[in-house]
Image (cartoon, rainbow, N blue to C red):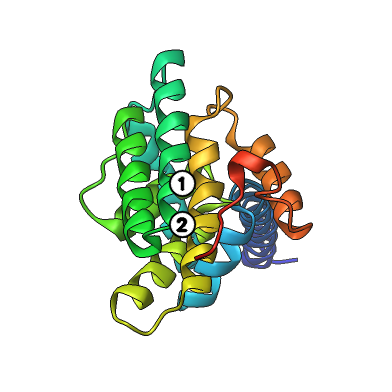
């Protein structure tokens, strides 16, 4: 067999091996990102032009997160935030719109104290999605409902739902184990599916 034939065969074999390796690496990357981001992976994939673009976006979030110095709250700070949230929920009875606005600011404050940049909402959501991917959509939905109320198109029920959504993220930000977001995120997702996010007396948001 001519030498050039062997060369062609060798090149073809190398190319085939390269394709298999590339596919395996891509599959591992997809599996890893799906495991880390959960439903956030699906949301980004739906909005992106391709899976490659979606995974590039999520990888960029991880890289940005690695550059941030995220720290847990001190015990004193945590106790203070829990008390402030209790007061916000009490405020909801007489001023639902004001209470939701205060809850939004409280979340931003907790994020800032933990080291997250808070200047822009979309960037805040993207940053927090790396550590809390299973509740970040609660944050977005709470913000949407609060915005609808501010525009005059929402209802007291929408504001109550906004408080519940905000609470899901708030709990993850201030809990002592906030540096273990994935395990708690799964628990929060299961709890939300059961409709039990605010079943204890101190977590119940009363309607006007």
Picture layout, residue 71 above or below residue 182: above
Task: Tell me the element at label 1.
Answer: helix
The extreme left residue here reads 119
Picture layout, residue 23 above or below residue 117: below
**Residue 90: numbered disc:** 1
The spot of residue 74 in percent (x, y) is: 42, 15
Q: CB under 8 Å between callouts 2 and 1?
A: yes
What residue does disc 2 label? 93
Which of 188/9 is in front? 188
**Image point 47% across, 76% down: which residue?**
47
Say if residue 60 shows up in the picture: no
Image-quadrant location for residue 88: top left
**Image point 26% across, 41% down: which residue?**
117
Near mark 1 (Cα within 10 A), the count class, few <14, some 14-19 or many ≥20, is some
The spot of residue 99 in percent (x, y) is: 37, 54
**Residue 30: numbered disc:** none
Image-quadrant location for residue 120: bottom left
Near mark 2 (Cα within 10 A), the count class, few <14, some 14-19 or many ≥20, is some
The spot of residue 138 in percent (x, y) is: 53, 59
Say if residue 89 shows up in the picture: yes
**Image point 58% across, 36% down: which residue?**
181
Which of 121/11 is in front? 121
Picture layout, residue 173 above or below residue 22: above
Seen in the image, is 9 located left or right of residue 128? right
Q: Work out which quarter of the rendered image holds the N terminus and state it.
A: bottom right
Picture layout, residue 2 above or below residue 164: below
Label 2 to label 1, Cα distance in Å? 6 Å
Image-quadrant location for residue 202: top right
Say how many tags the image has.
Answer: 2
Which of 77/180 is in front? 77
The spot of residue 107 in percent (x, y) is: 37, 44
């Amino acid at each position: 067999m001519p030498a050039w034939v062997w060369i062609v065969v060798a090149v073809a074999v190398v190319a085939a091996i390269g394709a298999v390796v590339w596919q395996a690496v891509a599959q591992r990357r997809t599996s890893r990102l799906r495991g880390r981001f959960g439903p956030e992976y699906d949301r980004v994939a739906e909005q992106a032009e391709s899976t490659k673009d979606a995974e590039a976006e999520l990888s960029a979030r991880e890289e940005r997160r690695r550059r941030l110095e995220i720290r847990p709250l001190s015990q004193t700070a945590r106790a203070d935030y829990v008390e402030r949230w209790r007061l916000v929920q009490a405020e909801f009875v007489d001023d639902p719109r004001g209470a939701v606005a205060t809850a939004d600011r409280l979340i931003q404050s907790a994020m800032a104290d933990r080291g997250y940049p808070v200047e822009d909402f979309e960037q805040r959501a993207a940053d927090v999605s790396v550590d809390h991917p299973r509740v970040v959509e609660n944050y977005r939905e709470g913000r949407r409902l609060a915005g609808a109320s501010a525009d005059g198109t929402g209802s007291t029920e929408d504001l109550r739902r906004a408080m519940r959504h905000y609470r899901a993220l708030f709990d993850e930000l201030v809990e002592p184990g906030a540096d273990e977001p994935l395990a708690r995120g799964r628990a929060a997702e299961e709890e939300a599916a059961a409709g039990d996010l605010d079943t204890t007396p101190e977590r119940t948001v009363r309607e006007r």
